[in-house]
Amino acid sequence: MQLNSPGESGEYECREYREYREYGKYIVAITLIFAASLIAGYCYAVLNPTESARFMEEIRAEFGWLVDLSPLQIFLVIFLNNAIKALLVIIFGLLIVIPAGFVAYNGWVLGIVICEEARTSGYLSVVAGILPHGIIELPMIIVSAALGTRLGVMAFSRMNGTISSKDILSEIKRSVNFYLRWILPLLFIAALIETFITPVVLHLIRG
């Protein structure tokens, strides 16, 4: 067993701290984008009730086929949809704008959905319909977008010659490992909750 010297240990901890702080910057930035787009979507729905109602009808029509599926099939659709999107937003983060655009669009849509559902069912129903699984799912999507954005910034730095291709490949490997270790399992749990627990909570709230 090889032991690190006190100097090596301190250097490792310092490097690890810098890396966590670096990731934290991207998570904060993506969270702010998501929050701003959610508010924008909500305000749009408030100011344009007819258009937002039409938009909701389009969403219901697009996903109406889900009601004909069994709970297990619904779970698989939700899980695979979120899992694939989370992975793609990491990989295609090399194009920089994709993660931010993905989060902004989904925040905008969620803002409209919240406003429209609150109009028809009340805010308590909205919270019950989003919070049980959303408390896990949304952070995982944000973290995925943050990882993708960091990859995009690194790719830009590579174009400027600041870092090497080896650094980018190492970061891709690290991001995918994090996805497999944390994001994917937590999205699995979120899909289970959304399929089997959230409907029960909604039923209890709505009577």
Image: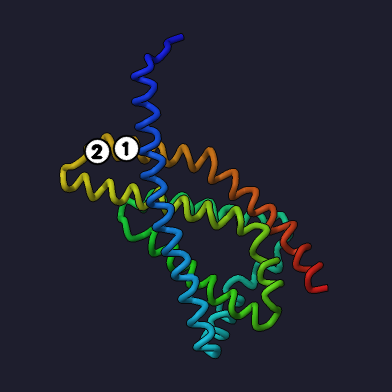
Q: Mark 2 touching mark 1, by CB under 8 A?
A: yes
Q: Residue at x 69, y 55 (%)?
A: 193
Mark 2 and mark 1: Cα distance apart in space? 6 Å
Which secondary structure, mark 2? helix
Number of other residues with Cα within 10 Å of mark 2, as a class: few under 14, some 14 to 19, many 20 or more: some
Residue type pointed to by label 2? Ser
Disc 1 marks a residue whose amino acid type is Leu
In the image, residue 112 sits, relative to residue 127, either above or below, namely below
The spot of residue 102 in percent (x, y) is 42, 63
Instruction: List the single residue furthest toward the bottom.
Output: 50
Q: Quadrant of the C terminus?
A: bottom right
Q: Is residue 160 above or below residue 120?
A: above
Q: Label 2, on which residue?
A: 165
Drawn side of residue 196 relative to residue 88, left or right: right
Horizontal arrangement in the rendering, residue 161 relative to residue 188 (left or right): left
Location of residue 25 in the rendering, given as x and y in whole percent from the top left corner: 38, 51
Q: Let me know if residue 101 appears in the view.
A: yes
Whether residue 85 is visible here, answered yes or no, is no
Q: Which residue is mark 1?
A: 169
Residue 196 at x, y = what percent? 74, 57
82, 109: nearer the viewer? 109
